[in-house]
Structures are given as structure tokens and as C-alpha cells.
Amino acid sequence: MDNPTHEFYNSKAAEVAKRYESVGGGLFELFPVLFRAGQSVLDIGAGSGRDMDRLHALGIDVWGLEPSDELRAEAVRYHPELKDRLVAGALPSDLGALAGRTFDAVVLSAVIMHIPDADIFDSADSIRKLIRQGGKLVVSTSTQRDDVDPATGRDASGRLYRLRTAGEIQLLFERLGFRMEDRFVSEDVLGRPGMKWTTLVFAYEG
């Protein structure tokens, strides 16, 4: 995440968290299908903690990595049980207390679109090192938005959006030993027009 994007989430953390917490459905409807109780799952870009809370309720050993201090504070306010499971850090190399750990799965929701091209391969490689052999990677990202300036790749708030296609993301992770298992296309859960989301499910084969 670049500095203008990071600053947006810091300055608008309360507003962003309230919006995230207000919606149901979306990616976390897949969690009971993809994961089982007792597995360890890392949510990179944990935001308001909504997805972490859902995973925790399913009996998952869930951890979160979130670069925004203010969003981590909001996540703990909404979900106090997550306090000791949220770690400061960001891709590609700032993994904080999670450095050197591995998990049964990694969830990357609304994150890869904020990663600059210069950091994308190193970020994907860092993700690979966090996943155990045979584990899963779930990537959900915007693949269509009408609020992004094509000249700058940013929205009106200054957030970076690199709208990579499903094919680009698939190729990126296949180069690192992942195999795509499934793909889903959906509308925006917040009801914003002009937006499409794609979720890709990978298995790490090494």
C-alpha cells in the first residue's frame, strides 16, 4: 500500500469500519465451504475485523495483518476478542510478529488492488512463504470500477487502484507454485454501481 492510500485509511478509519461492518454476505459466505474448525488462517489487510470475526466464529485459529493503526483500533472496538490476534504490518516485507510463521490459508480481500506494480511480485512471494504446502489462498479484488481515473489509477480520495484482471492474478500466483481451484465474479456488496469483484481460490502445491 502506498502512502496516499495508507493515509486515507488512517484518516477515514471510523467511517470505513462502520461501512464494512454494516454489510453482510460477500466473501465470508464462502468461509464455511473453504475452511474448517481448527485450521489457521491469516487475513492480510484485516480492516475492521469483520472477516476475522466470522472466521473466529467458525472455530478458525485466525490472525490478522493490518497496516493502519486506526483501523486496527476500530477492529478491536467492534471485535474485542481479536485484540491479541491483530498484528501491525504490510506487504511485501513488513510482517511484524508474523514473520516466519506459516498458515493453512491466507485471505487477501480488497488488498491486491492497492499494491503498486513495483511491489506486486515481492508481495506474492511473501504470501507464498506464509502458506503451508497444500494450503489455500483466497484473493478477492475489484476488477471493474468506474470511480478510478485511468490516467492516475486513483480515485477521488487519492487511493491507488491497480485493476488487475483475473488472468493477471492467476498467472502471478501460478508462477509461484499455486494452482487455481475456483473463480467467482460478484456485484459490489455495498451496492455501488459500476463495480465488479472477482474472487480466486488457489491451492499451494510448491
Image: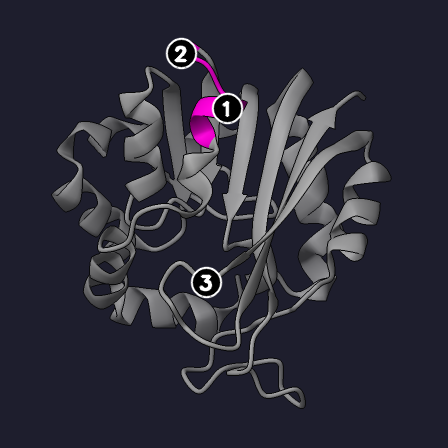
Residue that carries the numbered disc 3 in the rendered image: 188
| Residue 142 percent coordinates (x, y) | 57, 62
Dot 2, how many residues are within 10 Å of its Cα: few (below 14), some (14-19), or many (20+)? few
Residue that carries the numbered disc 2 in the rendered image: 37
Q: Disc 3 vs disc 2: Cβ atoms closer than 8 Å?
A: no
- Could you say which is closer to the camera, residue 167 or residue 187? 187
For marks 3 and 2, give the CA distance: 28 Å
Q: Residue at x 52, y 61 (%)?
A: 1
- Could you say which is closer to the camera, residue 53 or residue 64? 53
Amino acid residing under circle 3: Asp
Q: Disc 3 vs disc 1: Cβ atoms closer than 8 Å?
A: no
Q: Residue at x 59, y 37 (%)?
A: 138
Q: Is residue 104 magenta?
A: no
Query: Which one is earlier in the sequence, the residue at label 3 or at label 1?
Result: 1
- Could you say which is closer to the camera, residue 45 or residue 181? 181
Q: Which residues are magenta?
A: 31-38
105 lies left or right of 45? right
Residue that carries the numbered disc 1 in the rendered image: 33
| Residue 175 percent coordinates (x, y) | 86, 39
* Residue 86 in view of the camera: no
Amino acid residing under circle 2: Ala
* Residue 9 in view of the camera: yes
Which circle, 3 or 2, is nearer the viewer? 3
Which circle, 2 or 1, is nearer the viewer? 1
| Residue 91 percent coordinates (x, y) | 56, 48
